[in-house]
Amino acid sequence: MEILVYGIGGVGGYFGGKLANAGFNVSMIARGEHLKAIQKHGLEVESIKGNFKVKPKMATSDVSEVSKPDLIILGIKSWQIPAVAAKLKPIIGENTIVLPLQNGADNYEKLIEILPRENVLAGLCFIVSFLEEPGKIKHASYEPKIVFGEADNSQSDRVLKIGDMLDEAGIENNIPENIQLEIWKKFLFICTVSGIGGLTRVPIDKIRDSKYLNEMMRNSAKEIIEVGKAKGVHLTAKHLEMVFEIINSQPEGTTASTQRDIMNGKPSELENFNGFIVKEGERLGFKTPVNRYIYECLKPMEEEARKSRE
Ligand SMILES: NC(=O)C1=CN([C@@H]2O[C@H](COP(=O)(O)OP(=O)(O)OC[C@H]3O[C@@H](n4cnc5c(N)ncnc54)[C@H](OP(=O)(O)O)[C@@H]3O)[C@@H](O)[C@H]2O)C=CC1
Ligand SMILES: CC(C)(CO)C(=O)C(=O)O
């Protein structure tokens, strides 16, 4: 199987690296100094599960240099999906499979606006990892896991084959009964903690210790559930409690990746998280005041962060 990993940051670097390390044919799309380092020395992964170094089959910034892949794993940020999907379109063959691993609730929908729906799976992942320096990814904590499937939840041969391949590479994975529900469960957690985390600029333990902020997180999560339910996702009070169990069990000092991007003045997934809830709420005819407050407070900073990257 020819694999292309598009975006070799924390997620793409770790999972792409693991596949290459298991002997699969992995090509990598990266850019800048990071690309130069991978081309020269390979990709180094420092992981709590064991360090390794790999030489990808090819590392390039130009997707047209890659022969038609069987599987494309997306390691980019959710807001980069439309631009990257447009670049990928010419190399999508009849049997190419595109697997998104991004946080966010509408990555599949964004992809099928540009790519044929029969080529696209739905997915998400769990890990704490980041680019430490050009050519080097650090997996700092969390048992890495990929959860994925067909958008219609059928157990197709192609998802089973990808599951086998991930098993072979030592990547924990799961093909759930309802991938949309899994995406929204993760989204409920990540959207609840990231915006408030970006706004308060403190780790989760400081937020949950404040009665006011804890209540704000709960109200934000309730709005996310309402939007999800209005879109046909079966989120319930049980999922709300599950999210707060996770929040309460996070070690001191924990921050989410989108929170860190906001705090570091980088373009973030704000639009795909709280912004998405605000806009979907409006479209569906109800108000989401807590998410609106978080979104509007962070938006000017987000606009500045994007300007500085132009
Ligand atoms: N990191 C984590 O711990 C986790 C992240 N996630 C989710 O996974 C997704 C990816 O996050 P993460 O890995 O942290 O993000 P990173 O920013 O670490 O990685 C994204 C990578 O994609 C590269 N990229 C983007 N566009 C292009 C392009 N056109 N050409 C070449 N390279 C490109 C970026 O390069 P450049 O820097 O030059 O823009 C960057 O190296 C997000 O949705 C995130 O929320 C989910 C679970 C955990
Ligand atoms: C919460 C976590 C670490 C789980 O993978 C995550 O998705 C993120 O920080 O973006």
Image: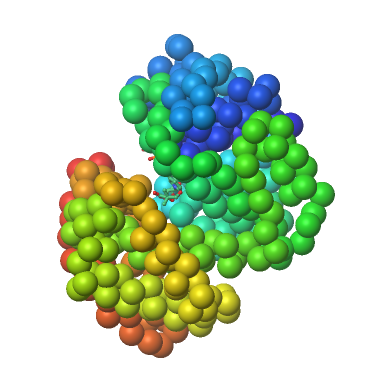
Whether residue 145 sits left or right of residue 79 in the image: it is right
> In the figure, 222 relative to 304: above or below?
below
- Give the quarter the ligand 1 occupies: top left
> In the figure, 179 relative to 96: above or below?
below
Whether residue 102 sits left or right of residue 263 in the image: it is right
Picture residue at 55% right of the left edge, 16% below the top: 55
Looking at the image, the residue that sits furthest to the top is 40
Picture residue at 25% right of the left edge, 52% below the top: 203
Can residue 54 be seen at all in this image of the molecule? yes
Q: How is the image coloured?
A: rainbow
Closer to the camera in the image, 109 or 173: 173
* Residue 171 point in image, percent of width and height: 62, 37
* Residue 220 point in image, percent of width and height: 33, 74
Picture residue at 40% right of the left edge, 30% below the top: 138
> In the figure, 48 relative to 216: above or below?
above
Q: Quadrant of the C terminus?
A: top left
Whether residue 196 sits left or right of residue 285 in the image: it is left
Whether residue 54 sits left or right of residue 160 in the image: it is left
Closer to the camera in the image, 154 or 29: 154
* Residue 45 point in image, percent of width and height: 47, 24
Picture residue at 57% right of the left edge, 59% below the top: 108
* Residue 62 point in image, percent of width and height: 50, 29
